[in-house]
Image (cartoon, rainbow, N blue to C red):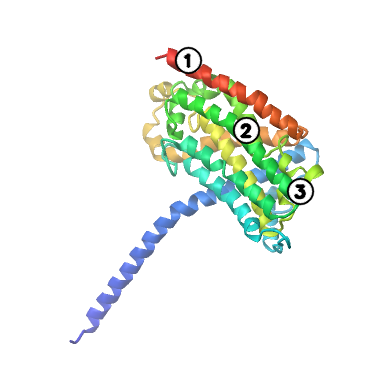
């Protein structure tokens, strides 16, 4: 069988088309994976820069200014430095637990972003149990910290891991009760439905006004979950050197800081979604539809505008945890446990009962 030159060229062109088609499909599979990761990374870098600038302003000193314009690349420089540092292992520690602990702490928090709605169209997984999936996943992170403390074979590290586990258990329950109250008000556990339920009356429809006690308890519990001052007892320098981070170096040491800021960002995002109306603006939907002819234009840019509103609220709220870190003193461990079990738990339970009663009487 003889094949002429034209047939050979046709075969080669078809093979190139198949290759381009396969490459195109692979690219479209990778884009939804790497785009959120890139966005989350940029978000964390912005938080680090904000915290350094705000802390410098509060302490009346000059913040980072040499790495990039206004010091915006300082966090990247610190990360690059940690990449080139040696990873040390304790001679008598458990190498497997020591290595797995930081990864569990980071991955469990990264998965939480899958249920965060930046817009009605920008959410990786709009689940009916999105809120409780976040709570379940976030409770895995302290297990990684406990594994890190135990695997280090160091008394300070182990005490830090135990403190992280005890602190998480103490404040996870009040936080869950606050989330249950929001779920009852919205008649849904989907994060998208909760934001939509706050859009009817604009600014006055936010759950912040309907659940002020729950908002305060959620704020305190989220600060404790993120181990921010005044709740940073698992890594208290004056008592435990660096807590569960004592024996770590290099990139593993950096992973703990990445996990801390990831947790802070996702907690602030959930405060925005649950209490601050998410991507909704302060004007009620009725006035927007009647007085503004923006339906067609808004429909095209809706995801971008909604994401901008969500992130603007989130970063404005971040001023609270950043400011408290540099203004409030650290509390003792007994005070932390007493606050969680004796005050926040009964108050959050009473708030849930009041919310349930009001919903029953409104039927």
Residue 54 percent location from the top left of the image: 72, 38
Instruction: State the CA–CA distance, disc 2 to disc 3.
Output: 23 Å
Residue 327 seen in the current view: no
For the residues labelled 2 and 3, say whether their Cβ atoms are less than 8 Å apart. Answer: no
The answer to which image quadrant residue 222 occupies is top right
Residue 67 percent location from the top left of the image: 71, 54
Q: Quadrant of the C terminus?
A: top left
Q: Nearer the viewer, mark 3 or mark 1?
A: 3
Disc marking residue 358 = 1
Residue matched to label 3: 156
For the residues labelled 3 and 1, say whether their Cβ atoms are less than 8 Å apart. Answer: no
Residue appearing at x 59%, y 29% in the figure? 174
The answer to which image quadrant residue 233 occupies is top right
Instruction: State the CA–CA distance, disc 3 to disc 1.
Output: 48 Å
Residue matched to label 2: 171
Q: Give the mark nearest the N terminus, 2 or 3.
A: 3
| Towards the viewer: 35 or 96 | 96
Query: How many discs appear?
Result: 3
């Amino acid at each position: 069988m003889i094949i002429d030159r034209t047939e050979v060229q046709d075969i080669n062109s078809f093979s190139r088309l198949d290759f381009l088609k396969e490459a195109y499909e692979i690219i479209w599979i990778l884009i939804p994976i790497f785009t959120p990761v890139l966005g989350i990374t940029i978000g964390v870098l912005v938080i680090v820069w904000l915290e350094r600038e705000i802390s410098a302003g509060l302490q009346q000193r000059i913040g980072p200014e040499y790495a990039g314009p206004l010091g915006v690349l300082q966090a990247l420089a610190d990360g690059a430095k940690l990449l080139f540092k040696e990873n040390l292992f304790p001679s008598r520690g458990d190498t497997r637990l020591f290595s797995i602990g930081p990864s569990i702490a980071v991955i469990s928090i990264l998965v939480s972003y899958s249920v965060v709605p930046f817009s009605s169209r920008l959410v990786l997984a709009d689940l009916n149990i999105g809120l409780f999936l976040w709570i379940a996943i976030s409770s895995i992170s302290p297990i990684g910290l406990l594994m890190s403390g135990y695997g280090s074979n160091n008394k300070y590290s182990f005490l830090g891991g135990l403190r992280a586990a005890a602190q998480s258990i103490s404040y996870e329950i009040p936080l869950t009760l606050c989330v249950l109250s929001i779920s009852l008000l919205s008649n849904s556990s989907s994060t998208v439905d909760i934001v939509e339920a706050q859009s009817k009356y604009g600014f006055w429809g936010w759950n912040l006004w309907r659940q002020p006690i729950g908002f305060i308890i959620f704020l305190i519990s989220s600060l404790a979950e993120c181990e921010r001052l005044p709740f940073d007892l698992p890594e208290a320098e004056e008592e435990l050197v660096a807590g569960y981070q004592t024996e770590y170096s290099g990139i593993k040491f950096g992973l703990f800081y990445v996990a801390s800021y990831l947790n802070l960002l996702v907690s602030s995002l959930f405060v925005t979604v649950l209490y601050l109306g998410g991507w909704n603006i302060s004007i009620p939907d009725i006035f927007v539809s009647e007085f503004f002819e923006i339906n067609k234009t808004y429909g095209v840019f809706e995801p971008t505008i909604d994401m901008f509103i969500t992130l603007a609220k989130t970063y404005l709220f971040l001023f609270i945890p950043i400011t408290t870190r540099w203004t409030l003193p650290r509390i003792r461990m007994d005070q932390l446990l007493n606050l969680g079990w004796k005050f926040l738990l009964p108050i959050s339970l009473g708030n849930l009962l009041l919310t349930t009663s009001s919903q029953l009487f409104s039927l």
